[in-house]
Each structure stands twice: as structure tokens, then as C-alpha cells.
Amino acid sequence: MRISTNTFFDQGIGKITGLQADQLRLQGQISTGKRFANPSDDPVAAARALEISQQKEMNATYTNVRTVAKTNLETVEASLTNITNLLVAAQSTLVAAGNGAYSNLERGFVGTDLKNSLDALLGLANGKDAYGTYLFAGYNSEVAPFTATGAGATYNGDSNVQQLKVDAQRLMDVSVSGDEVFLANGNNVFTTLNDIINLLNTPITDATTQAAFSAGLATAISNMQTSVDNIMNVRAAVGSKLNELDTLDISGQDRNLQYEKSLSEIQDLDYAEALSEFAKNQTIMEAAQKSFSSTAQLSLFNFI
Amino acid sequence: MASNILSIGKSALNAAQIGLSTTGHNIANASTPGYSRQVVVQAAAQAQNFGYGFVGQGAEVSGVMRVYNEILARQMISLQSTSAAYNTYGNQLNAIDNMLSDETAGLNPSMNDFFASVQALASKPNDIPTRQTMLSNAQSLVNRLNSMDSRLNEIEQGVNSQLVSSVGLVNSYAKQIASLNDIIEQSISTTGNIPNDLMDQRDQLITELSKQIKTTVVPQNQGTYNVFVGNGLPLVVGEDTYNLVTTTSPTDPSRIEVAYQSAAKVTVLGASSLTGGAIGGLVQFRNDSLDVVQNQIGQIAVSLAGTFNTQHAQGLDRNGDPGGILFNIPAPVATSSSENTGTGELSAQIIDPTLITNSNYRVQYDGSNYRVTRLSDQTSQTYASLPQTIDGLTISQDSGTINAGDDFLIRPTVNAASNLSLAIKDVNKLAVGSPVLSATINAGNTGTGAISAVSVDSNYASAPLTTALNFTYNSGLPNTLTLAPSTQPVTVTYGGVSTTYPAGAPITYTSGATISVAGTSFRLSGSPANGDQFEIAPGTSAGAADNRNGLLLANLQTTGNVAMIGSNSKNTYTTAFSQMVSSVGNKARELKVTGEAETKALSQATAAMQSESGVNLDEEATNLIRYQQAYQAAGKMMQIASELFDVLLQLG
């Protein structure tokens, strides 16, 4: 077989440049830590990696939404706790007011006490979150939901509840509307308080007023109990939603870990393998260069 | 006799000299591209009969021949053009592959940021910074789509200019080959000898030509070559040349097409005529990859922007106004062929962004019917008149008259990504709330009935409620609801079963059932008391915490909105994008692997040719020594012949 001088040089150099290209590719892999730089290096793996990172992003998005949901619900829960405490204290005051030994003046003191509670309750009902929006206004969260009136308070908000998508298949209520808390079951807690305050401030002069007072007090105690029960229910619901969010968070974290693991398996470089291949290639390149240079020097023209 | 020896010596000297010259020529041209080594063909001169036998008369050189194997050469030329085609296509595609997959410049990061900010907007609709972030991310997404498409346009311009220079090269090679044909023919007919170096030059030109386009050579009797390119287009016939020219495409002024010029007629060549070589690779790249990717990115842009626009229009913004357009979507491009005889112009409009495909469409009028062909799969339909709607696109006639034989090209998504823009700059105009605002329990209700939030269907925005709808609960057997005002039918769906009550009829109450009326839907649940009332009232301004339209906008990320040809199911935007990246990656890999294989085959074919025709310097060194010795021996022989003559002279 005959080899022309051109072939000898072309192929020799061709092999060396091929080895150089390989080295460059290995170097690129080692410095980025990624097994493939472009989808064309490994299209199947690239497509899978893209898919998994999309899912990972969605998972992260839901985690963010859950953070918002938790903040909202925790704020609501804290406020409901305060409201509950206030109402429970008002309840014991009410029961105490039934003391037949109280004079009109003393009942007046109770009335003032309850008036303070009513004002405080109104303040809590018009509570805001960290962003400055009203908690118990339904969708109308930039207008104070409750306005004090002579009969107690009127509700300016609506019955809507804000929902958030906290997981792929879970749309969760993350707010509580004012009417659900304070006006449910036909009981307006402000009206209840207002009425009994008025009664307490009315002097008892005769049997009629006494009977009116007793009946009014009984109604107030009963209505108040209903309101407190209702608020406890709402609180329980909020609490269970917070629990659910925690569970979702845990499974979200698990999923995230799985996605990261899968992604790493697909696209991360095995450094041990890459470095040993790099060293091997280096040796081959050196051998190729040395052998080429020694055979290239052989020429009959040196001897004639 | 002595003179005979002298003339034999002279012929030997001559032969040795020619041998040395040829060897020297070989050594000098060892690195000349396309050079085939030349050998001297020596023959014994005609012997003379002297009665006692034939006495040889020395050597004569019957010719200088180049070592050239035509079969190996044809093989190499064919591999040259396929290898050039693959490598050109592969190089161009790599540019797109890199652009799509780049982690910072690719589309994925922008899309992810945009959707994350839409989710954040749905979570905190009344927070101004969150709204601003959503607008900024939308603008970034638009910018990214713009810049990707403009990069594709740059690549197209690059293809245009490469086509121009390739065609220029083809034409210049053709001229040179034709003139060499002329000279070679003359040399052969006047001298009878073959001009080896000119033949080498011509073969080298053919090799260079085959890198540009597939080349076939048919040698003729007088030593000329007839050269055909592509699928058999004559380029050089004897001394005549025909030209390839570049011209603007009749249907797209920004595109350059390769055409064939014969006599005065210029015919635009299709991809099937332009195979092989850089030209074939470029044309195939443009048709199969560049155009497809541009249309696909456009389709994603149209689908995303269109579906967001549709959903946005169903919401209410912070001022209580219905949402306007979120993105400005460029109109489809409709061009009339420059060869049309009529003056008709067509236009096209996108009416359903979820049905738009990534194909172009061709409309042809034959005098009575319009034939619309979807170019990606060549399916067509015939209509008697326009306008017609196909694949979410309405094609209609704008102006002028259309004559029989007129041809139009419609490209729905080609400009969508580059000319997409954001239509909203004011954060208050983001429509995150939904039109029907309030679902209220009457304050005097005594039962435990609850009403859910109200959602609207896609037709609500065009016919919103103007008055409140009031539902009153009537306990009885069965428990019913009465609607006032009672001008609309009501549909109740529970457990997958729907019942429709005509306007005014009492509606049976089922706790938890979904009630739909006038485009709205909501749920009533619990146990209302007799006389309890529930109201759905159209709001004039969205409550600041109303995020219902925001939730629906965020849901678009996971619903299938991008149509696929040949399938009834649709992809999500990110899936459509991933598929596009994946198919470009696959094609690039295929081209890389095949290109490497072709390059290897080419280098083997080249090596085979070189092993026959290439110069080996060591071999030539040996030849030098051989001819030198022959020369020395011949010289010695002439010296002896001269001494013999001296002997004769001394006799007298």
C-alpha cells in the first residue's frame, strides 16, 4: 500500500487536532460541572432535564404561595384568638352583671366596662395585616369593614373569601369574611353587646324594667355564647388549614429533594470519571505528538 | 555503427533528462492541491533489422502520464458535497441550538419568572410592588421573545449572504471550467497529447465546485467536461456556461432564493433541485429548521399572549374597569406572489389562539375555487368563497381583484415573537379581580346557608349582569330557591348531573350543588332557613383583595393551550417550548453524528485517491537517484562511443 506525503501529514495532524478537540470538550465539562453543554450533546437527557426543572419550578411556586397563605391565616388566627379572649371576658362580665345585689350605679360600671370591650372588639374587627389591608372585609379590603353605629355596627364588606392555589390540586380559602365571624347565624355580636350595654345603663325602677333587664341579659348571654361558639368554629377551621399547609410543605420539600436528585443524576458530571479520562487523553496526546514528530523527520533526502 | 551508439546514448540521455524533469516537477508540486503525480512512460525505440537480427535503437519517451483514478475521484466529489451539506446545515443549526438552550439567554428563565410573578400577583393582588414585578417580568418575557426572533432573523440574513457568495463561487468556477475545457480541447486536438496540469486544475475546480453544490461530470470525447449541478441542471456544456443567480423570493422580500438562468428566463429553484454542498445545506437548513423554529416560537408567543389577553379581558382592574389587552399580538403576514396577474390582497386574522398551528398556508385561486393548503403536512381544502376560518385563522380578501392562477402565502406566526409588545404600563390596569363581585348572605339570614365565591365563564365579559340576582330559600318538599329577577334559566349541577330550570321555575335546592345562571357560577351549601336570602350583585369596582381572575391567569400555565398538528390534545407553553428545544437538539445531534461519519468517509476516500495519485517524497528521491544513475550511465556510453570513433579516426 502506498502513502503519499500529503496523506501522512494530513492524517497525522488530523488525529492530533481531534485529540485536542476532545481535550477541550473534557475541559469544558470539568469547569462547568455539567455533563452536556448543549441539548445536541445528549438530546434525550436534555429533554428530561428540562422537564424535571419545570416541575421543580412549579413546586417552588406552590411553596411560595403556601408561605403567603400561612402568613394570612396566621394573622387571622392571632386576631381570632384575641377576639375570643375578649368575648370570653365579656361573657364572665355579663354573667356577673346578673348579680341581683348590684345597684344601678354598679350596673352602670359594668356597662362602661362592656362599652370598652365593644370598642376594643370593633378595633379588632377592623384589624389590618402587615400590608395594611383589612382582615375581615371580604374582597373589599381597602375599606374598613365595620362602622360603629348607634345600634352597634354595620358591615361594609362582602361575603367573599380569598382563595389561593397552594398545591397542584388544592384551592384553599385563606381569609375569613367579616360577616362569617361577627354576623353568623343571625347574631350580630355588636348588636348583642350594644343592646345589653343600653340595658345596663337604663336604671331599674320597677318590676317591668327588672323583667326587661333579666330577659335582655338572658338573651345577651345566650347570643354571646352562640357568637363565641361560632368564632371558635372559625378558629378551628383556620387551625386545620394551617396544619394542612404544614403537611403540604413537608411533601413539597420531599418532592423538591427528589427533583434535585434526579436532575443531578442526569446532568451533573461524574468528576472521577471525567478527570481520569482527561489524564488518559493527555497521555495519548503526548504520545501522538512525539510519534508524529519523530516519524516526520524521517526523509530519504537526509541521506542523499 | 558508432553513430548508432551515439544516437542510442542520446536517446538514453534524453529519457533520463525527461525523467529527472518530471521527478523534479512532482517534488515541486507535492503540496499543490489537486496535483496528480506524473510518470514518464518510456518505451524501447523501434528496432532495426540488420539481417542477422533486430538491433534495438534506444529508448523513446512515449508520453508523460498523470496517475489519476476517475472512479476514486468521482467518489470523492460525491462525498465532498454530502459532507459539505451536513456540515453547513450542522453549523447553522448549532447557532440555534446554543441560543435555545442557553441558561441565561434562553426562553426558560424568562417564562419561569413571568409565571412565578403571575402566581405572586394572584396571591397578593392589592400589593403594588407585586403588580409592578409582574409587569416587569412580562416586559422581560416580551423582550426575550423579541430578541430570540431577531437573532433568528440575523441567521436568515446570514444564510442569504452565504447563498449569494456560494452562487458567486459556483458561477466563477463554471467560467474557469469552461475556459479550461476550451484550452484542453485545443491542446489535445493540435498536439495529440494530454495537458496533465491543466487537467489537474480542472479537476481541482470540480472538487471546489462540489463543496458548494452537488456536481456531476460527464466527460466528452474531445477531452471536455460537461458539468451538471444539483439535480441535473447543466452548468457547463463544452465552452458554454449557464448561471445560477440569486433573486428575491416572490413571496418574501427579505429572503434570497437561488434561481437558474437559461436564455432570458430565470426560474427559482426549489429545495429538491438544490441538493448537496453548502448551497444544499443552507437551503435545507432554512426550510426544515429555521422557518420551523421561527414559526414555533411565534406560535408559542401567539398562544401565550392570546390566551392571557382573553382571560385578562374577563377580569376587572383596580379602577373597576374590564381588563383590556395585555399583549399586542402582531397580525399574520399575507403576501401575494409577485407573479400574480391580479391585484388582490389577502389578510388573515387570529381568532382562536389555541388553535393556531406553526405551519404556513398557501392560498391558490383557480378561477372558481380557493384552495387553502397547510404547508407543513400538505393537506388542503377547497372553498367556493372567502372569508374562511381554518386552524383558528380567518382568511379574507382585503382589496383588489384576484385572477385565476394567483397565489398567496399566509404566515400566521412568523412575526409574532419579534413584534410582540406589552400593552399595559399602568399597574392599576392589571385585571386581577373578577366582574361579579359580591356573593353575600343577607344579614337577616337565620339558617346556616353559605355561598361560595362566584366565578364567570368566558362569555360573561361580553354580557355582564346589570342588576343583582337574588335567591330566596323556601323550605318545603322539596326545598327550593326562587330567583328574582327571573328572566334567565338556571342550571344546577351536582355529582356530574345537570338540570336546567326555565326562567321563573322554582329551583330544587341541593346543598353543595353548583348553580349557573347568566354566565356566573357559584355554590350554595349548608341548611338555610325559610326566607333566607343570598345575593349575587355585579360590582362596580373590584374589591382590592379579589384575586379570582388572577388565579385563572395563573392557571393558564398548566392548561394546554398550544395546538399540535395532527392531534386533538394541546401542549402547555413550557411543554411546547421543551419539545421545540428537544427536536432542535435531536436534529443537531443527528447532523453531528452523520456529519462526522461523512467526514470520515471523505477522508478515507481522499486517502485512497492520494495513495494512487499523491506524491511520496521518498519515492521521488529514489527516482532522482535512479534517473541520475541512468543519466551517468548514458553519459558514459556516449563517452565510450566517442572513444570508439577516435579509434576509427586513428586508423587513417
Image (cartoon, rainbow, N blue to C red):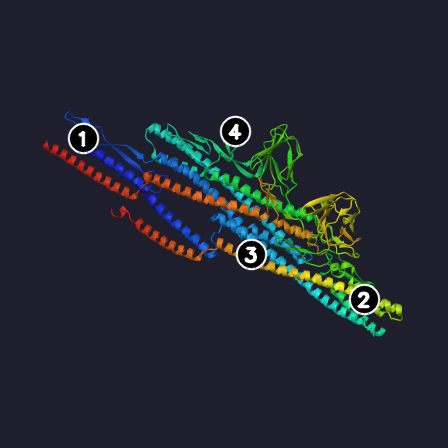
Q: Which mark is residue B264?
A: 4
Dot 4 crowding, Cα within 10 Å, few <14, some 14–19, many 20+: few
Whether marks 2 and 3 lie on the same chain: yes
- Label 2 belongs to which residue? A218
Q: Quadrant of the C terminus of chain B?
A: top left
Spot occupied by residue B110 in the image (x, y as percentages of width and height): 58, 52
Amino acid type assigned to the residue bearing label 1 in the image: Asn
- Label 3 belongs to which residue? A255
Provide the chain ID for the residue under circle 1. B
Tell me which label, 2 or 3, sits earlier in the chain.
2
Number of the front mark, 4 or 1:
4
- Distance from the alpha carbon under mark 4 to that under mark 1: 67 Å
Dot 1 crowding, Cα within 10 Å, few <14, some 14–19, many 20+: few
The answer, for residue B204, to whether it is visible in the render is no
Whether marks 4 and 2 lie on the same chain: no
The answer, for residue A99, to whether it is visible in the render is yes
Residue at 78 percent of width and 44 percent of height: B505
Question: Residue at the front extreme?
Answer: B477
Amino acid type assigned to the residue bearing label 4 in the image: Ala
Secondary structure of residue under mark 4: loop
Tell me which label, 4 or 1, sits earlier in the chain.
1
Question: Contact (CB < 8 A) between labels 4 and 3?
Answer: no
Spot occupied by residue A6 in the image (x, y as percentages of width and height): 34, 43
Q: Which mark is residue B4?
A: 1
Residue at 41 percent of width and 39 percent of height: B80
Spot occupied by residue A291 in the image (x, y as percentages of width and height): 32, 51
Residue B494 vs residue B471, the one in the foreground: B494
